[in-house]
Image: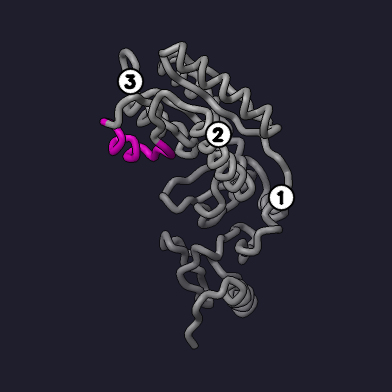
Amino acid sequence: MVIIMIKVAFCDDDLSVLSNIMVLLDQYRTEHKREIECAVFYSPLELLVEMEKGMRWDVLFLDVLMPGEDGIHVAKEIRQYDNVVKIIFLTSSPDFAVESYAVGAYFYQMKPVCAEDFFRLMDSLIRECEKAQQYSLVLCCKSGIARIDLNRLEYCEVIGRTLRFYLDDGNVMESTGSLDELCGKLARYENFLRPHRSFLVNMEHIKNISYKTITMDNLAEIPVPHGKCSQIKKQYLEYALNRNLVLLA
C-alpha cells in the first residue's frame, strides 16, 4: 500500500495545549512511522491569512474559545475556502458541540487531550484521508490547488483548453488541460464513460439515456453522437450489473 503524506494544522491560543499536542504528534509519527507535515497557528487570523493565500491541510485542530473570534465562526469562514479539510474542535466545554457539526466538523475533542484519545483519532483521520486521496482528483484552478472527490463529480466538459468540472452540489470548477489526458488519469475507475469527444460522465450520476441525450442527476443533457446510443447503453448496463444494481426489464 502507498503511504501518503498527511498535512495537519493546529490553531490554539493556549501555548501549553499546543505544546502538549505537538509532543503527542511527534510520538505518533515515531511509533507509527508516518509522514505528517504540520503547521502551528496561535491565532485564527494567522490561519485565515494563510488559507486566503491558498494554503490547504488535510486536517485542522481548531480551538473553540479564542480571543476575538470563536472557533465556530472561524470554521464558517474556512468553509468558504475549503470544504474538504477535516476540522477537529478542541475545547474544555461541550456547549458548542451541536454548532460544531453545523460547519461539518469531523470530531469534537475535549481538553486535555490524552495520548490514547489522540492516537485513536489520528488513526481514524489517516484512514479517511487515505480513502479520500485514493479516489480524488487534484486540479490547478484560478483560485489555487483544489481536490475533487470523484464521487461528487457528475460530468466534465472541455471547451478549447478549458476543462469544466460539474459537481453534485451545483459548483463548477475549471482547470486547463485536455479531455484525453483526463480520461487517461481516470481510466482505472470503471464508472467514467466518454460518450462524446467533449464530455466525460460519471455513470453513478446518470438519470436517463435516450437516443439523443444522456440526462444527468442535475438534469444536464449530454449529447449522444449518431449511432453511439447502443454502445453507450451496453457500457452502462455492464457497469450496472457489475455494481449489482437492480434492473427491471
Give x and y (percent) for residue 83. Answer: 45, 38
> Which residue ends up furthest to the top in the rendered image?
15
Q: Main secondary structure of the magenta part?
A: helix
Mark on residue 65? Answer: 3
Q: Residues within 10 Å of mark 3 (few under 14, many from 20)?
A: some
Figure check: 185 above or below 218: above
Which residue sits at x=58%, y=44%? 127
- The amino acid type found where label 1 is placed reads Glu
Of the residues tagged 2 and 1, which is closer to the observer? 2
The first of marks 2 and 3 along the sequence is 3
Which residue sits at x=36%, y=25%? 91
Magenta-drawn segment: 95-107
User: Label 2, label 1: how many angstroms apart (C-alpha)?
Assistant: 40 Å
CB within 8 Å, label 2 to label 1: no
Mark on residue 127? Answer: none
User: Label 2, label 3: how many angstroms apart (C-alpha)?
Assistant: 23 Å
User: Label 1, label 3: how many angstroms apart (C-alpha)?
Assistant: 47 Å
Q: Residues within 10 Å of mark 2 (few under 14, many from 20)?
A: some
Mark on residue 119? Answer: 2
Figure check: 77 above or below 127: above
Which residue sits at x=70%, y=32%? 33
Q: Which residue is mark 1?
A: 181
Q: Please tell me whether mark 3 sits on a helix, a strand or a loop.
A: loop
Of the residues tagged 1 and 3, which is closer to the observer? 3
Which residue sits at x=64%, y=48%? 134
Give x and y (percent) for residue 85. Answer: 49, 35
Residue 197 falls in image quadrant: bottom right
Which residue is nearer to you in this view: 244 or 33? 33
Give x and y (percent) for residue 60. Answer: 49, 29
The first of marks 1 and 3 along the sequence is 3
